[in-house]
Each structure stands twice: as structure tokens, then as C-alpha cells.
Image (cartoon, helix red, strand yellow):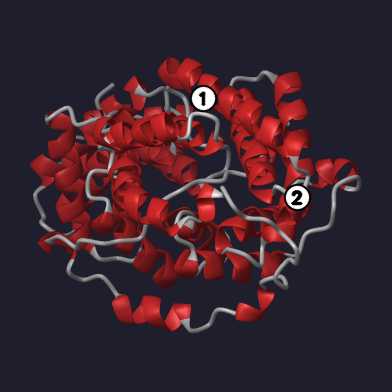
Amino acid sequence: MKKFLALFFLLFGFAAAQAQVPDTTKQLDQKFLDSLQRTINLDSVDVLPQALDIKGWLLLNESIMNELGGAVDNMYNFKFETAEKQFKSLRRRYPKHPMPYFLLGLSNWWKMVPSNINDSRFDAPFLAYMDTTITLAEDLYDKDKKNLEAAFFLSAANGFGARLHSERKNWRKAAVMANRSLDYLQKSRKANGLSDEFLFGEALFNYYAVWIHENYKMLRPILYFFPKGNKQLGLRQLQQVAFNGFYTGTEAKFFLMKIYANETNNGPAAMALSQYLASTYPDNPYFQRFYARMAFTQGNLTLTEQASLQILEKIKQRAFGYEAISGRYASFYLGYVNQHKNNDLAKAKAYYQQCISFAEQSGEKESGYYISSFLNLARISDKEKNVKQAKQYYEKVVDLAESKSDAEKEAKAYLKKNKRVNQ
């Protein structure tokens, strides 16, 4: 149930797409991104709505866009104090509009993202800002049912609130807010033709409604009561928002990156987008570790090593958001690089041990990197002819690995072969 709620509660975010590429990521595949952009089906946008009074809509205000471009950049680059000063300045000028409160809530949301939303320190301010967003948006919508910007914020704030409540296992609150989010999403979609910002929510719904149907058979009876999705349309809509949205462009890239990496097996596209996000927001720990992951899975060990060392350095500096989860990724990659590329087994062992320590700190003992660290330590110990130590590591693998997995089979075979050694 938690996975269903966490995936189905639509996440609406804001970000700007200005990029400053540091020297360490000049390999950014801009040609690939350009070719991807050319594949966008622009016909997926709805017809422009008629007879809408958009006066007072901050989402469509160009001066506000120009003002907030730097603020959302700072937020996504984890310069929260600077970003929030600008959001609060907007709040002073528009105290009755939901937008500044939503942005302040979003800022607190991203403080939780590196921990995979496990860090509860920011729950209270996040929920308070989203509640205020909902209250103010309801006031606007009650006064004017054609205020689709208000409907947008009602859908967005309820969606984010539902997601957090699902993470905290507050199922009743999550279900109520999810239902409200979907209701207002259907209302706000009439404004899709005005701006790609409005299209973002529908894109996520179209994609994930089908994705959940495909991956969670037990939930299909529940999905019967929801509107039908369209996975391919949702993907095209996300592509369109990624390259044309002002506020939602980076968030759409974020979702596309994960879809390409985890769902469509499009490694080159995921790599290009991860490079873009990592180079645009060099202090965002989530983007940095995803970039390191993509470099690793694409076999570019030079970039993997470079990105991973930078992550560990920022952990050492206690940069915000750089904690055990990112350390687990980076340490494992550096262990692998030193084992297979640099042929420095001493460093490899140290990094694998560090990965194990980070995984234990973050409570991720079932993660693949945790198990693989023991497996590689066992292999290194065997290579160094330290059979006793190798057996100890392989015994950990047997305890941790899934039944009949390759790791378990390797460990059991080694232990059987060396049963009488050093006993």
C-alpha cells in the first residue's frame, strides 16, 4: 500500500533550467539532449482555454519568473537560506497568494530528498506551509471556480502532503489528500494549453497510472475507480515539460532521468540528464549520487571515480544533505574502481569497509551495495590467500543474500570447497 501511495501521489515541483557547467563535468552530452528535445511531440498540449481571466496568476507572470529563476536554482543547489529569503520576499508582497508558501514548503521537501524522505526533522514546517497553501488556494478557488492556478496549487499541495503522510504511514490522511489532489488535477488540466507548468501533473498521472497497473496487479481493482492513464503520452508530455517548462522543467528532467534509468532501460538518455542536473546543481547530493550511479552503470569508471571522490569530500566537509546514503554509493563505486581499474586492493578494501559502515549508519543492510561489499571483500581476501578471512566474508554473504541468488551460490560453493581450511 505504501509503494502505491508513494508513487501515485503526484509530485509537483518547481525548478529553473539555467546551467553552469563546472570543469569536472564538461563531458555533458549536449548533442544528445538536443536530439532528445527534437523528438518532443508538441501536439500533446491541450487547446488554449477560452475566456479565462489570468490576472493575478503568479505562475504566468514574467516578472515573477525572472525574479524567481535564481531562487529556485539556489533551492535545487541546496542553498536553502538564500532561496528562502527570496521566497519570503515574495510572500511579503503577496501574503494571500499560495505560491510563496508552496515554494517554502517545497524547499523543506528537498531538505528531505537526500535521505529518501526518511529525515523527519522538516515534517512540521513542510506540512505547515502546505496547509497554508491549501487554505489560501481554497479561498481563491471558492471566489472564482475558473481560477485554475488555485486548482493547480490545491492539487500540488495535497499531492505533496499525501506523499509525506504515506511515508510516515498516516494512511487515512494520505488517502484523503491523494483524492483531493486528483480531483483538483482534473480541474486544473483545463489550463494545460496556457503553460507547460500545468501539463506537468497530467504527465505524471498519465505515466504512473499505467505503470502501477503494470507492476502492482493486486492494486488493479483500486485503479478501476481512477481515470485511465496513457503511458506513452505521459512520457511525451514529460519530455515537453522538461525542455519547455520554466518552473517545472528541472523537476520533469528529474523524473525522466529516473524513468530512463529504471524503467525504459535507456542508459544514454539517463546519463545525459544526470550529467545536466549534476552540473547545473553541483551541491545537490541526490543529483550527484545519481550521476555517479549512471557513470558507473555506463562503465565510465573515470567519471565514476571523479564524482564519487567529490561526494566523499563533501561528506567530510559536512555539506548539507551529504550523509550516509550518498556515502554508501560513493564508497562502493570507489571500491570497485580501485579493485578493477586501479589495481589497488588496499584502497579497494578500505572503501568497501567504508560502504559497509555507511550502510549500517543509514539502516540499509539489505541493499545490494552492502552485500556486494562483503562479496568483493571475500574475493580480495581469497586473492590474497587469506582463506580464513574470505570465509568470514562469504558467511556474511550467505546470511544477507537472497536465496538461490548468484551471490549466495558463490558463497556456499566457496565455503563448501574450503570447509576444512583453518578450522
> Measuring 45% from the left and 32% from the top, which residue is drawn there?
109
| Image position of 394 (left or right of 74) | right
Helix, strand, or loop for circle 1? helix
Q: Is residue 106 above or below residue 341?
A: above
Q: Residue 253, percent across and down?
A: 45, 60
Three-letter amino acid code at the position of disc 2: Lys
Three-letter amino acid code at the position of disc 1: Tyr
- Residue 169 is labelled as none
> Measuring 38% from the left and 64% from the top, which residue is drawn there?
273
Q: Residue 37, percent across and down?
A: 46, 78
> Measuring 43% from the left and 31% from the top, which residue is drawn there?
91
Res. 388 in view: yes
> In terms of image quadrants, where is residue 165?
top right
Query: Residue tagged by mark 1?
Result: 129
Q: Is residue 181 above or below residue 249?
A: above
Quadrant for the N terminus in the image:
top right
> In terms of image quadrants, where is residue 352?
top left
Query: Residue tagged by mark 2?
Result: 146
Q: Residue 323, percent across and down?
A: 28, 29
Q: Dot 2 surroundings within 10 Å: few (below 14), some, or many (20 or more)? A: some
Marks 1 and 2: CB-CB under 8 Å? no
> In terms of image quadrants, where is residue 42?
bottom right
Q: Is residue 188 above or below residue 360?
A: below
Looking at the picture, tell me which residue is in the foreground, 108 or 208.
108
